[in-house]
Image: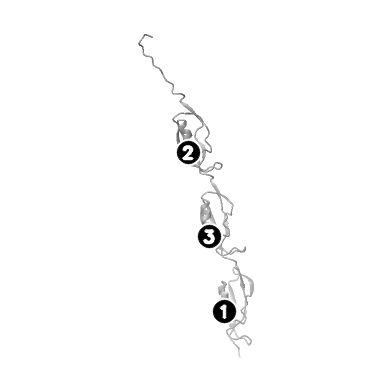
């Protein structure tokens, strides 16, 4: 070159590419710090994942050789898409509803039924789907609430006053039918006999109990 000529020198900026490793199971902040150190941008999205815990990286849009300045989409796990029906049998309806909500499930309403298994009135006796069933979050769970035992102990009111018999039988949930007839042995207004006397009367099958009340002597 002639003396005084201009020489252009190009200074290397290094490779325009960088290499991205897997960020699986990194926290959000760890992934952000890592990509920034490589000169890369980051965009976070969220999705369900069955193997990575909630709040950690489960997927990324690129690994290996990428151009610096690129934006990497990083997916943060929302946890499993599935949950399980909680154990609520025997609890109150309000407690069951709270447990269902805590499991990320929807309460689908309740119905009432008689319990043959000793579940107290007002307590959960069945769940649909059943306890422990694996469901997608947001699924609906319904309850069946116990009305108590369907069996009633109907005692004998023979030789007892009519009103006592009526009140006692009605208190058990039965309808009372009264039939008056003369009696030479039972005082007027007292029960002569009744259609049912049993320690285990099923209220589902027996709706009405008849009492025969003395109208006094026929003579």
The number of discs equals 3
Camera-nearest residue between 104 and 207: 104
Q: Say which mark, if any, is on residue 214.
A: none
Image vertical order of residue 141 relative to residue 10, above or below:
below
Labelled disc at residue 93: 3
Residue under label 1: 164
| Sequence-wise first label, 2 or 1 | 2
- SS type, badge 3: helix
Q: Residues within 10 Å of mark 2 (few under 14, many from 20)?
A: few
The span from disc 1 to disc 3 (Cα, nearest Å) is: 35 Å
Determine whether the residue tagged by mark 1 lies in a helix, strand or loop: helix
> What residue did someone put label 2 on?
29
Q: Residue at x 59, y 77 (%)?
A: 210
Looking at the rendered structure, the secondary structure element under dot 2 is: helix
**Image location of residue 192, percent across then percent down:** 62, 82
- The image quadrant where one finds the N terminus is top left
Name the front one of labels 2 and 3: 2
Position of residue 175 measured from the top left corner of the image (x, y, whole percent): 56, 74
Alpha-carbon span between mark 2 and mark 1: 76 Å
**In the image, which is nearer the foreground, mark 2 or mark 1?**
2
Question: How many residues crowd around disc 3 within 10 Å: few (fewer than 14), some, or many (20 or more)?
Answer: many
Q: Residue furthest bottom?
A: 219
Location of residue 43 (image quadrant): top left
Name which quarter of the figure residue 118 lies in. bottom right
């Amino acid at each position: 070159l002639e003396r005084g000529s201009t020489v252009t020198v190009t200074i290397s900026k290094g490779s325009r590419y960088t290499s991205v490793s897997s960020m699986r199971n990194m926290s959000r902040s760890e992934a952000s710090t890592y990509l920034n150190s490589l000169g890369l941008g980051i965009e976070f999205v969220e999705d369900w994942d069955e193997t990575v815990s909630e709040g950690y990286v489960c997927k990324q849009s690129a690994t290996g050789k990428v151009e610096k300045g690129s934006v990497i989409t990083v997916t943060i796990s929302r946890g499993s898409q599935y949950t399980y029906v909680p154990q609520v049998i025997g609890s109150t309806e309000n407690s069951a509803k709270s447990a269902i909500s805590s499991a990320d499930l929807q309460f689908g309403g309740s119905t009432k039924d008689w319990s043959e298994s000793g579940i107290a009135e007002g307590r959960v006796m069945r769940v649909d789907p059943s306890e422990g069933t694996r469901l997608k979050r947001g699924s609906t769970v319904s309850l069946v609430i116990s009305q108590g035992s369907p069996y009633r102990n109907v005692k004998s009111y023979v030789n007892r006053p009519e009103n006592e018999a009526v009140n006692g039988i009605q208190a058990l949930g039965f309808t009372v039918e009264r039939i008056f007839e003369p009696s030479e042995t039972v005082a007027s207004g007292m029960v002569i006999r009744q259609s049912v006397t049993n320690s285990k009367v099923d209220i589902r099958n027996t709706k009405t109990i008849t009492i025969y009340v003395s109208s006094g002597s026929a003579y």
